[in-house]
């Protein structure tokens, strides 16, 4: 039978404190690799055979330079304004389909695809 750490009123007991050296804590944080320290420590102590707990959002960015480039590209692209103008022109019937318009739409589509790829890469996600 597993012990519960609750008192008679059903509340959790007071937090447990553990003193570590700077080096010990640094090693723990490195081993936890983005997981909460408490979750990682509990997993290691009580359930190491279970798969690792899910990462929390503490360190979601894998590549900060890539994310900065993505934000810069978003700022330069004016995508939201351009897409809004295109939608308005389509609704009013004033969007002529010329080779230039088609090229602009293809470029906007490529920019969006590039931004998506960069964002996925910067956050360390898989497509």
Image (spheres, rainbow, N blue to C red):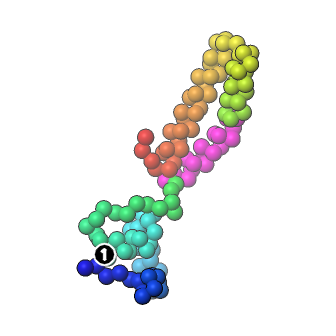
- Identify the residue at horizontal 53%, vertical 44% (top origin): 119
* Residue underneath mark 1: 46
Q: Is residue 70 above or below residue 54?
A: above
Identify the main secondary structure in magenta: helix
Residue 106 horizontal side relative to residue 42, left or right: right
| Foreground pick, 54 / 21 | 54
**21 is within the stretch colored magenta:** no
Up-down: is 40 above or below 112?
below
Question: What element does badge 1 sit on?
Answer: helix
Position of residue 87 measured from the top left corner of the image (x, y, whole percent)? 69, 25
Horizontal and vertical percent position of residue 84: 70, 30
Count numbered badges in the picture: 1
Give the magenta part as a residue range.
62-78
Task: List x then y, in percent, for residue 106.
Answer: 59, 22
Image coordinates of residue 13 in percent, x first then y, are 44, 85
Image quarter of the C terminus = top left
Residue drawn at 25 percent across, 79 percent down: 1
Horizontal side, residue 10 vs residue 69: left or right: left
Pick the residue in front: 64 or 91: 91
Nearer to the camera, 67 or 13: 13
User: At 57% from the left edge and 48% from the top edge, which residue is drawn?
Assistant: 67
Residue sitting at x 25%, y 67%: 49
Asked if one can make out residue 3 in the rendered structure from this viewpoint, the answer is yes
Residue 24, picture quadrant: bottom left
């Amino acid at each position: 039978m597993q012990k519960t750490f609750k008192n008679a009123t059903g509340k959790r007991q007071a937090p447990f404190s553990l003193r570590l050296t700077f080096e010990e804590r640094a090693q723990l944080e490195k081993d936890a690799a983005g997981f909460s320290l408490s979750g990682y420590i509990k997993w290691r102590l009580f359930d190491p055979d279970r798969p690792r707990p899910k990462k929390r959002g503490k360190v979601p960015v894998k590549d900060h330079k890539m994310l900065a480039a993505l934000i810069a590209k978003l700022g330069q692209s004016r995508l939201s304004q351009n897409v809004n103008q295109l939608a308005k022109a389509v609704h009013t019937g004033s969007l002529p389909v010329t080779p230039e318009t088609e090229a602009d739409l293809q470029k906007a589509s490529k920019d969006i695809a590039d931004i998506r790829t960069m964002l996925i890469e910067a956050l360390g996600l898989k497509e």
